[in-house]
Amino acid sequence: MEGKINGKRQRGRKRKSWLGNMEETTTRRINECCEVALNREEWRRTIASNLWQETEQRETSLLKLSLVLVVVVVVVVVVVVVVVVVVVVAVAAAAVVVV
């Protein structure tokens, strides 16, 4: 374990340390994590509960993103239909004027 984090961070964002990630993931200070880690079962429960919460948050975010995507697709389809109807009406009106 080298303590490196894969991927790129956004421009202007500070690097995250491994210790910072541990504190963020477990919502505990490092000294508390060390104490909890002495008891293997408690450490496993801590990590498992935090991973479960992160998974739920990720699933909720994906669901919201999916809903937004569906709404955008529906809006685009409605706009295309309206544009087609307007063009058809304009062509029909032009044909009536010519006749």
Image: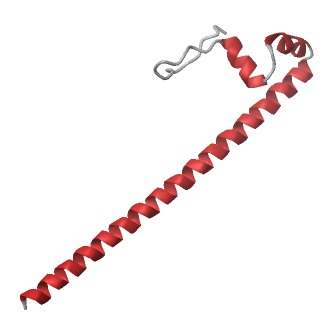
Q: How far across and down, in percent of the image, does residue 67 sit?
A: 56, 55
Residue drawn where x is 63% and y is 7% of the image: 2
Residue drawn where x is 36% and y is 66% of the image: 79
When the figure is inspected, residue 17 is found, relative to residue 96, above or below; the finding is above
Residue 3 sits in quarter: top right
Classify the position of the N terminus by image quarter: top right
Q: How far across and down, in percent of the image, does residue 37 sit?
A: 86, 14
Q: Among all residues in the image, which is located at the extreme front?
A: 97
When the figure is inspected, residue 5 is found, relative to residue 48, above or below; the finding is above
Residue drawn where x is 75% and y is 18% of the image: 23
**Looking at this view, is 63 or 42 the one in front?**
63
How many numbered circles are shown? 0
Residue 78 sits in quarter: bottom left
Q: Among all residues in the image, which is located at the extreme left?
A: 98
Classify the position of the C terminus by image quarter: bottom left
Q: How far across and down, in percent of the image, does residue 17 sit?
A: 64, 12
Colour scheme of the rendered structure? secondary structure
**Looking at this view, is 84 or 2 the one in front?**
84
Q: Among all residues in the image, which is located at the extreme bottom?
A: 99
Task: Using residue 78 as the reference point, say whether residue 22 is left or right of it.
Answer: right
Task: Using residue 6 as the reference point, say whether residue 89 is left or right of it.
Answer: left
Residue drawn where x is 78% and y is 23% of the image: 26
Residue 96 sits in quarter: bottom left
Task: Using residue 9 as the reference point, say whether residue 76 is left or right of it.
Answer: left
